[in-house]
Structures are given as structure tokens and as C-alpha cells.
Image (cartoon, rainbow, N blue to C red):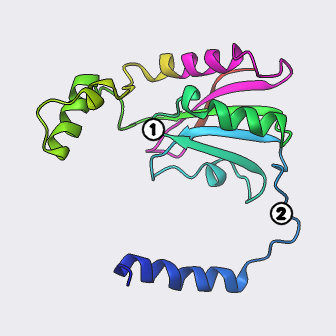
Amino acid sequence: MGSELDKVVIENNKKFAGTFNSDGLDIHPARKVVIITCMDCRLDPIAFCGFKVGEATVIRNAGAYAEDAARSVLLTTHVLGAEDIYIIKHTDCGLIGVSTEAGHSIIKKNLGLTESEDVDKFPILGIDNLEKSLEQAVEYMRKHPLLMKRIRITGWIYDTDSGILSKVINA
């Protein structure tokens, strides 16, 4: 037996599957782009970039960190033929201003712990400066030893209030 949400998802999926058409959808991203962005539920990179399903590979993680996404990015460029990497960070990110200590404190509280070596080792990766964080992510990917030199990497910031996507770092 599932939760009420499970039932809603199953019902919604039946409706979706009833109109779904996979014709023309290929495993390779049609626009040859891979997007690294945040896991924030307010972000829909396919929509705000004006793409359709099948046109871009989207990799999401807390804070849009290139280090966390690198494995998937490398596979998308080498195996699936992506030629562009868009790193998209956003305003009002939940990690802005979050210190490692504060993040660890929340996790320990939620687990009912006062001390934990495992929590103390867990990387929170808070963001002090959005633009600097974006620059570091772009630089990390540009210097990655397994990334082909011909791959174009750009940095973007999405404004969660206005919906505007701004290119901040050119290839």
C-alpha cells in the first residue's frame, strides 16, 4: 500500500502516458548541451531555456556544484556528444549564507545526535558569493583533465523572482 502522494503520482502518470509520444526522442541531447543546475524545486531549466524534452541533459545537485556533476558531465560529453556545458546557479539559493557548522548542526538535530564524526565530515558547500561560486564551478570544469578542450563552458545566473536567465561567463 502506498501513500496518498503515490496514488496521485500513479494517476497523473496514467494521464501523461496516455498522450506521451516518444517519436524522435533520442538518448543524445538534440541541442548537444548539458546543463548543471541546482536541485531547487523552483527551477525548470528545460522551460526557462526554451528547450523541449530530449534537447538537453540536465544534472541537478544542491548548489549546482560542478564537482558533484563532473562524472555525469564527462559521460554526456564523451558518450552522448554534448558540446556545450551550461552551469546555471540561481538567486535565493538555499545554500547562500549557510555555513558548514550551521548545516552540520541541522543534520545532527534531525538525527537526534550531539556528536557525529560522519556528520562532521559531510560537505555542506554553502555559498558565500553567488558570482564567485559560479566562477569556481566554470573554472573547475575548464581545468578538468578528462574534459575535451573543444567543449564550450558558460556560466549563467537565473533570477528566481523575475525568471530572467543571464549569461555571466562566456565560453
Tell me: 160 left or right of 169. Answer: left
Tell me: 116 left or right of 79. Answer: left
| Residue 29: x %, y % from top left | 81, 49
Q: Which residues are magenta?
A: 134-163
Q: In the depicted view, which residue is nearer to us: 75 or 32?
A: 75
Q: Is residue 116 above or below residue 107?
A: above
Q: Is residue 14 above or below residue 127?
A: below
Tell me: 27 left or right of 121. Answer: right
Residue displayed at 33% across by 24% down: 121
Can see residue 99?
A: no
Q: What is the quadrant of residue 24 in the picture?
A: bottom right
Q: Does 14 appear in magenta?
A: no
Residue displayed at 65% across by 46% down: 58
| Residue 133: x %, y % from top left | 49, 20
Residue displayed at 57% across by 52% down: 44
Q: What is the quadrant of residue 164 in the picture?
A: top right
Residue where numbered disc 1 is placed: 62
Q: In the depicted view, which residue is nearer to us: 37 or 157?
A: 37
Is the N terminus in the top left, top right, bottom left or bottom right quadrant? bottom left
**Crowdedness near tag 2: few (<14), some (14–19) or many (≥20) residues, C-alpha within 10 Å:** few
State how far apart marks 1 and 2 are (Cα): 28 Å
Can see residue 135?
A: yes
Residue displayed at 43% across by 83% down: 7
Q: Is residue 54 above or below residue 1?
A: above
Q: Type of residue at label 2?
A: Leu
Tell me the tag on residue 18: none
Total marks shown come to 2
Is the C terminus in the top left, top right, bottom left or bottom right quadrant? top right
Tell me: 121 left or right of 147. Answer: left
Residue where numbered disc 2 is placed: 25
